[in-house]
Amino acid sequence: MVVPSQRVLLISFLLLLVSTTLVHAKGNKPKAQGGGGGSLNGDDAAAGDNVDETDDPATQGGKKQLDHGPVTYDARSVIINGKHQLLFSGSIHYPRSPVEMWPDILRKARRGGLNVIQTYVFWNIHEPEKGQWNFEGNYDLVKFIRMIQDNGMYATLRVGPFIQAEWNHGGLPYWLREVPDVIFRSDNAPYKKHMEEYVTKIMKLMKDNKLFSPQGGPIILAQIENEYNAIQLAYRELGDSYVQWAANLAVGQNIGVPWVMCKQVDAPDPVINTCNGRHCGDTFVGPNKPNKPALWTENWTAQYRVFGDPPSQRPAEDIAFSVARFFSKGGSLTNYYMYHGGTNFGRTSAVFTTTRYYDEAPLDEYAFQREPKWSHLKDLHKSINLCKKTLLTGIPGTQRLGPDTEVRFYEKPGTECAAFIANNHTTLEATVNWRGQNYLLPPFSISVLPDCKTVVFNTQQIVSQHNARNFVTSAKQMNWEMYLEPVATVEQVPVNNRELQELYGLLKDKTDYAWYTTSIELGPYDLPMKDTISPVVRIPSLGHAMLVFVNDEYAGSQHGTHAEKGFVFEAPVKMKKGTNHISLLCMTVGLPDSGAYMEHRYAGPRSVTILGLNTGTIDVSANGWGHRAGLNGEKLQVFTEQGAQKVQWTKATGIGRALTWYKTTFDAPPGGDPCAIRMTGMGKGMIWVNGISIGRHWMSFLSPLGQPTQTEYHIPRAFIKPKNLLVVLEEEPSDPKDIEIVTVNRDTICSLIGQDYPGHVKYWDRKAGILQHAPGKSLQATALLNCPDYKKISKIEFASYGNPDGSCGALTMGTCNAPESKKVVEDLCLGKMICTVPLDPKLFFKAGDPCPGTKKKLMIQALCSFK
């Protein structure tokens, strides 16, 4: 489009100034990549402006029409159909949720203020065997992308092919490991051949379905490779040339949208280098060319967990601070990794990674809004969108206000101004004066002022709702039956190799389990003469876990960790005169997903020795071993209705033998709440519901806090029938009597706000360039309670106006409390789906303030139900 000459001068001045900020490198006047220019008119109805829908769940809200057309970029932002954009993105991975959950997840993402959904493409699920492609069901990538567009959002496609993602083998299919002379992620002819075929296949699929923005689709960005800088040095010059080749491969696909490489400082032009991390506003070195925008492809909303980890969280306040910082410094896209983590069903999780993935994301594993994270970020998006036009067209400036305080602002002299006032001190609040007005800043916070006067949002002060998750027992004391998995010996698994085979190569990623069998003859003088002395079996292993049986008797188990996969098994065993059978059940817990030379990682036993014999230590590593991948129960598929009929089940009573299959049935829990299974009393193994694997359980691997890393395992409603078959493979001696089927809800809702908090940003809007407040809505902070799923507030469990403390689900009284607090809240809220409670001292202190000088807070905890 034609831009007036005055605007050209203004833009030139803007871009020169922006190039000196943290996220922009110095250089000449930026030029839009691909030759396209862009309108900087922030009032354009760009897709993704925060939809200020009512919180009433009965209100669906409207969908904004996406802008389509060419996608280019310049130093300020991505440009879609000639319009500069501010993009709020979230990672949602289609294989980590059943297709039936996708509409609800995407709708909540849109309502949370996102205008982009980012997903990886998972090569190993789409091409598990060379040339055999699968895009059905949960793997229907085209359907997922179209559904993103139907919900009024754009898409970013991270093609990889290496994706890491805590996904099995980093997304690379196992067969690729067995390609002769292959070296992953290097300037290696065999690898490049298969990578090019894969990338071309996926790009053609997207083109054929017209899913790129120039075709009218939602895809506006694509990513090649993933965080390659972390391993590039390991490949030396072959790493450098691989980066160039990968970029050329991507650009050569001619898809009409820009490509990015995350954490790749030397991303070749025109590919954009982007940031991953928690605080890219401070850690990103910036685009490597002055004509590239500052994009943040992974803003980690928490930390994924591996078995043995304690809980890990990231507060909503910290995420909001980091995003406000990034946009205040010229950033134009942030992506939450993850926005919804979902579940690693089956054997899809990477080495030692739990079934539950990024449960601390704004949408938890069950797709519930995790509050206040979801709402606080929604409010943040609204506040930044109120600044949108000014951010995209204003001249940037920075002013220090004190040792730990500063303001970053964008201004069009005499017309528009937007500011971000920051207090960088982590423990002390600060009062600053800027342009004649005082502002109180909580510690480590940023206040957003869309008009450089009015604080509509502060990253540290949460005015949105909180909630707590509840697990409600639906079925317990189920009737269990058991089937003992046969312990393989050389009679069932004859010797087929002199030495111990490597485990990955034996399993070929078809199963977690492989038998290693051998036998040894002992004479009467080989065995210890004293009853108090027993032989000891010692087995060093490269990982990941192992069960040991000697003469069909369980001798024990051992396993590694995510940090140290290898371990040494040592245990006394009972051996006899004559033939002694040694049976090892060796296991993987997912394949590696990171690091250089992944094709050269190995697992399994390295040697087997017997100590404590009269004849000395015996090394049986080269004794001749039988090898067999998989269990008998897996082969017969005893976890299905038909397969279960192929074996004899007996009643389960007490603690069973190691390596036992357990079977029961349960009725579908009433209602529509998500379901899970609580694995109390169990050790390690796998779970199937109606023949579908919901993943690995591991209760016996305790964190440093003495608790299992994960106790409940998601069973999506889509997997459940009126009557359900539940099968558990348990590797350790366990008793299934305490296993429970539970339903999940977030019916415990809270409001925790202070008297100095700003009013809700949802009541602010910008019309004709002027910031306006909704008439009749309070400018002061107000407690807002909103029940999910059409439920109503049935009980006020806690209410205190004064100085209460705690978090939702664990609130406590302080030294100052208004006696009328609970009654006031009950009168305003009981029986309602939504209610508001003003922070009005006169409402709570009928006889005057008994604790003047105390900074007041209102904390409420309510229970929602259909009653």
Image (tube, rainbow, N blue to C red):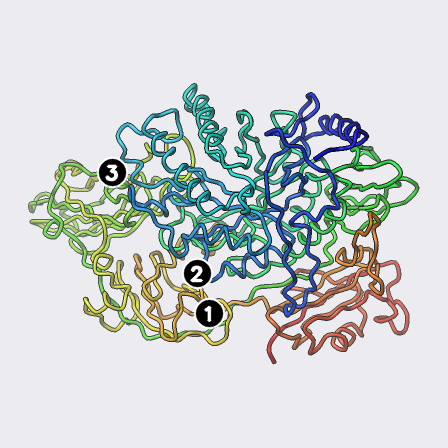
In what element is the residue under mark 2? strand
- Indicate the position of residue 296 as horizontal and vertical percent values: 60, 38
Q: Residue at x 59, y 29 (%)?
A: 34
In what element is the residue under mark 1? strand
Q: Residue at x 19, y 46 (%)?
A: 516
| Vertical comparison of 693 with 85: above or below | below
**In the rendered image, which residue does mark 2 sit on?**
713
Instruction: Report which quarter residue 765 is drawn in.
Output: bottom right
Q: Which mark is residue 742?
A: 1
**In the rendered image, which residue does mark 3 sit on?**
502
Question: Mark 1: which amino acid?
Answer: Val
Q: Mark 1 or mark 2, which is nearer the start of the sequence?
A: 2
Instruction: Report which quarter residue 508 is drawn in.
Output: top left
- Indicate the position of residue 507 as horizontal and vertical percent values: 25, 45
Gap in Å between the C-alphas at discs 3 and 2? 31 Å
State the residue in front, 511 or 112: 112
Gap in Å between the C-alphas at discs 2 and 1? 10 Å
